[in-house]
Amino acid sequence: MQVSVIIVNYNVRYFLEQALYAVQAAGALVQTEIIVIDNASTDGSREYLSGKFPEVKFIWSTQNLGFGKANNEALQYATGEFVLFLNPDTIIAEESLLKCYNHFSQNEKCGALGVHMIDGSGHFLPESKRGLPFVKASFFKMVGLSKLFPENRSFSSYYAAHVAENKTAPVEVLSGAFMMMRMPLAKKLEGFDEDYFMYGEDIDLSYRIVKSGWENHYLAETTILHFKGESTSKQSADYRKHFYGAMKLFVQKHYKKPGATVLKWLINAARHSSTLLSGSNKDQSVLNSTTKAVIVCCTYDEQKVLTDFCQQISPGSAIDFFNNKEAIMDMFAVSKELYAFQIPTLVMSSSVISYEEMIAIMKKYSGYFSFFIHSRQSGSVVGSTHKNTTGFALGFTQ
């Protein structure tokens, strides 16, 4: 076995369904096993998924173990040369696993790697590559300077601004959304630190990898899609509790005074300010009211079910169908002129467009479309209405 893919699920059955179909497609190029551990979901994940993926090993926990402990539980069953810790709200490209596998083969010092990630609107996710949260880096992030000056190496050291988005290079911290490791190293380090319940585990493990003499690499040659924050809203009390609690734990484990004292003060201040500033998150389960056109690229057999989907998310919108890749690429050539006064929705099916091509389209046309993805065999569609919102999933009966 070359790669063991481990996914922790918690109440995101439709996202997980799409993720699994994409991983299976990537598994055609690399010998792959898939292990899913469910953290006591209450959304019907077990009933919905078990029969669809008989070749996937499912572990059904009776309690929410948290991210790190669940991954470690699944790690005991993994037999690959490498292990990929993958979020359920991701879609990888067909060549992602192969490119990662080859990078390890050509870079003996690389102990773990992450990849170029985009969000549901096609925009680059800066957490694809990060630096360690030292005092200065943490301060600039918490006060917002890293967001205001993303290209500045000093202000944005938290996001490894010294490494260009399109450049493969060693970095200090990888994202737990896609974190691939050499299996012996993962076993030696005993996986994630289970003291973290949610958030911070990837920073801690990345730091321990570097301390053990290995390098973490950011691989820019492949891109994956990551719908952020599906299980926990960033506006919620649970998010603030777990995120800032994780930061405090990391400081206690790896920092010495006086830096630790300063960082703890920053974390407390940031948590307090986020509580005051957080407001109600508007429901993003429907499209922008200015959207009046839906473009669907699928087979004739899929038109009926995807028409029903489009009518649910955008009632009254005109729907244009394309059943081949060439036709939709011709449409893209004039999309800016055709849709100058609205942001149309683009629904793509893997029966017509590969996952890699979908991701490339999202990168190129970010800002011009709202994107949704449907795997041919699936009973759902996942996507995002616009930048900086969590993803949206809808299941249907085929």
Image (tube, rainbow, N blue to C red):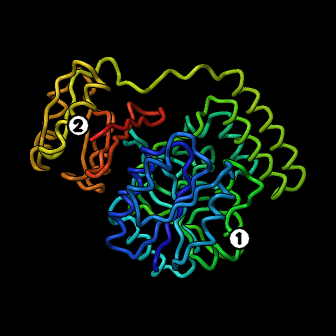
Q: In which quarter of the image is the C terminus?
A: top left
Q: Mark 2 = which residue?
A: 305
In this rendered view, identify the residue nearer to me: 374 or 263.
374
Q: Which amino acid does label 1 sit on?
A: Glu
Estimate the spatial distance between the alpha carbons at disc 1 and disc 2, rounded to whole Å.
45 Å
Kindly identify the residue that appears in the image at 42 percent across and 27 percent down: 285
Kindly identify the residue that appears in the image at 33 percent across and 17 percent down.
289
Is residue 223 visible in this depiction of the protein? no
Q: In which quarter of the image is residue 345?
A: top left
Residue 335 lies left or right of residue 152; in this view the side is left
Residue 12: percent from left, percent from top? 50, 43
Q: Does residue 51 sit above or below 12 in this rendering?
A: below
Q: Which of marks 1 and 2 is in front?
A: 2
In the image, what residue occupies the spot 66% across and 36% down? 239
User: x and y percent of residue 21 in the render?
Assistant: 36, 57
Query: What percent of the width, then of the height, locates residue 84?
Result: 52, 66
| Mark closest to the chain's N terminus, 1 or 2 | 1
| Element carrying mark 1 | loop
Q: How many marks?
A: 2
Please name whichever residue, 16 or 229, is drawn nearer the observer in this view of the structure.
16
The crowding category of the residue bearing disc 1, from other C-alpha atoms within 10 Å (few below 14, some 14 to 19, many at least 20), is: some
User: Residue sitting at 47 percent across and 73 percent down?
Assistant: 3
Q: Can residue 378 be seen in this view?
A: yes
Task: Tell me the amino acid under the disc marked 2.
Answer: Val
* Tags 1 and 2 touching, CB below 8 Å: no
Q: Name the element at disc 2.
A: helix
Q: Which mark is residue 190?
A: 1
